[in-house]
Image (cartoon, rainbow, N blue to C red):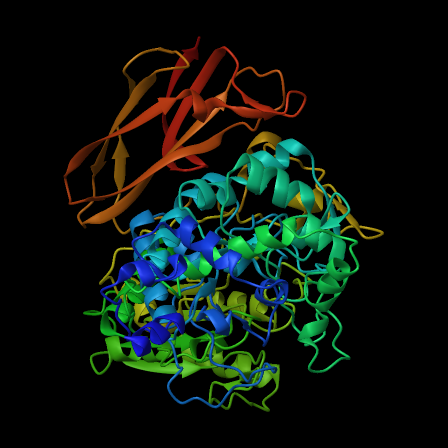
Amino acid sequence: MKQRIVCLLLGLSGCFLPIQAQNIPVYLDESKTIEERVEDALSRMTIEEKIALLHAQSKFSSAGVPRLGIPEVWMTDGPHGIRPEVLWDEWAQAGWTNDSCTAFPALTALAATWNPELAMNYGKAIGEEARYRKKTVLLGPGVNIYRTPLNGRNFEYMGEDPYLASRMVVPYVVGVQSNGVAACVKHFALNNQETERGTIDVVADERALREIYLPAFKAAVQEGQVWAIMGAYNKYLGEHCSHNAYLLKKILREEWGFNGVVISDWGGVHDTREAIFNGLDMEFGTWTGGDDWSNSDSYSQYFLANPYLELIKAGEVGTAELDEKARNVLRLIFRTEMNRNRPWGKFVSEDHSKTAWEIATESIVLLKNNRNLLPIDVSKAKKIAIIGENAIKKMTVGGGSSSLKAQYEILPLEGLRKYLEPQVEVVYARGYVGDVSTEFDNVSTGQDLRDNRSPEELLKEALVVAKDADYVIFIGGLNKSHEQDSEGADRKSMDLPYGQDKLISELAKVNPNLIVVNISGNAVTMPWVNEVPAIVQAWFLGSEAGHAIASVLCGEVNPSGKLPFTFPVKLKDNAAHSLGAYPGNDGKVEYKESILVGYRWHDTKKIKPLFGFGHGLSYTTFEYGKAQLSSSTLSRHEQIICSVEVTNTGNKPGYETVQLYISDLKSSLQRPLKELKAFRKLMLNPGETKTIEFAIDNEMLQFYDDTKSAWVSEDGSFEILIGSSSTDIRTKAKFNLK
């Protein structure tokens, strides 16, 4: 019996509870509530043990309490896949041979599906991979708002609309945490540029904060019950967000009731006292000296390590804050590492590949399709030319902390050849040379992309190959190189790099059947838009990229993706750039556009976008009936039902995402012309009609009145606008709020 009790105290997973349960410490008694177990564990810990919970002991781990059998906490990067194992105190690989993961599509792609069910599947699958790799916390998803198309990290987020991001983040979080792995929603908050991200002080009015930049975080906390939040690098109200009293204490804890753990971004802590009193729980760093990379082997010198302990011993600070932080960390551990009922997870399975493929195919957006050029008629095509570096460049490596070592990555050229050959002759020409690097943090793609030919030679070859082909598929866009779609730096321009615009225009001159596939996590300019009959937005699609692109282009899958952000015609059409409010001056960036972000700006200012928010075509067509309301009057304590019929009027089955926007026709404060308030994705067979119902309530009509510090609605007239995108409204209906 003595041996069994020792085994329990060490927290070994293979041990069983003794018959004399009354001898078990409360913190090890699974019949007790988590809060009871947390309080008991806390009562048994020394100050030094509590401090040890609060800071890193390696690049991605923090200490547990070995004396009590409380395990370590292990983090992993990866909103898109599980990061390869690194050395204890370096970014370099640990040299494992079994840590190659499934690469899931980037979160812009997930948002482009407009399918919360897929978000649940995504979270569950990536949570299974994290659990299998024995991770405690998955550092994702990211829900920072798409404010500027230059933000290098936009590909990691869920677009420009707070409602869409909210509906997609909740099931993702639930899916991850169903595995006993904590999701960590990031970066809280207002981290909407990489330029000077560690020092910039964001000046945003309270309405913008509440209406645009916080809703997805709030949904993750209150609806998703997320177990962890990551503080951002930037400042707000003069305080770094990883220890920001207003964000972390006033809003997150007091208003939203968050009972999880607040984790700093790596190296995001700058002051011990602020970290103590302003709501931070766990400090992690890029370098061993916190944010000082000149020190080595100095985790004990983190702001929440020895400096905190010394303040306590000197009597300069008390221990109430320490106990609260330790509670939060212990609660995380009991929810994860000390939950013996959590599943074991799995890694790189067939069903994970299927999930990755489903997300990838549903995310692809058909932007333009003149003459119904797509899908490719394989029965009639004899020769197809594929041109562009992104057809052969692996995209899972690079981009910053989301860089992956994927078990496999199907390239677009590979996927198309697999689908088309031998029935169709496929010829390839590179067309341009961009970034030939193939390694990031010692993870290599194994490719050799070096090409010494001149731009003129590459162009000439591409035109020759394209001239006599039945179809030309150009596959280009951005990549995950520095100053493109990548952490740590923003783009310098919205234009396509490496001379791609000229190449596309020249290809359009020699072959009318040109299809442009843009791979990116950001909007790009398209000066050739009127010269090209078919344009496809394909994102960073992960392991199944090539299969997904081929499936859509060749008609095996009817495209159903919708843009999660606006494509402006030019950079100056974006609000932040129009107002000169990016990247900031003298250490500050002012969000002068306030709530008018994305389509809200374009609509209100009557600026026509290149492609609007929510835009996405199909290989079939859909007809909308007239919107019907159950009542023309809405009271604040009731609902009215808005119904609309949608019919597939084409000859192919397809998904349509019906979007409902609401316009406040008269408000005491400025409001956008319209705001997304609901959407529904449905499958319709040819000739099939379905009726969709949306419940409209008072909450959907509210805005944040910063003079009252409250959400309010005002009596008056409102208009419901239902359509296929923000720029394609099919039916309207008015009602009054009384």
Residue 616 visible at all: no
Above/below status of 656 relative to 127: above
450 left or right, relative to 367: right
Q: Quadrant of the N terminus?
A: bottom left
Q: How many marks?
A: 0
Residue at left offset 31%, top offset 51%: 560
Q: Position of residue 688 (x, y in %)?
A: 14, 38
Q: Quadrant of the C terminus?
A: top left
Q: Position of residue 661 (x, y in %)?
A: 43, 30
- In the rendered image, which quarter is residue 470 located in? bottom left
Above/below status of 425 relative to 627: below
Q: Position of residue 169 (x, y in %)?
A: 42, 49
Residue 519 visible at all: yes
Could you say which is closer to the camera, residue 12 or residue 267? 12
Could you say which is closer to the camera, residue 38 or residue 725? 38
Q: Position of residue 711 (x, y in %)?
A: 55, 24
Residue at left offset 69%, top offset 73%: 300
Could you say which is closer to the camera, residue 663 or residue 724? 663
682 left or right, relative to 527: left
618 left or right, relative to 99: left
Residue at left offset 45%, top offset 68%: 70
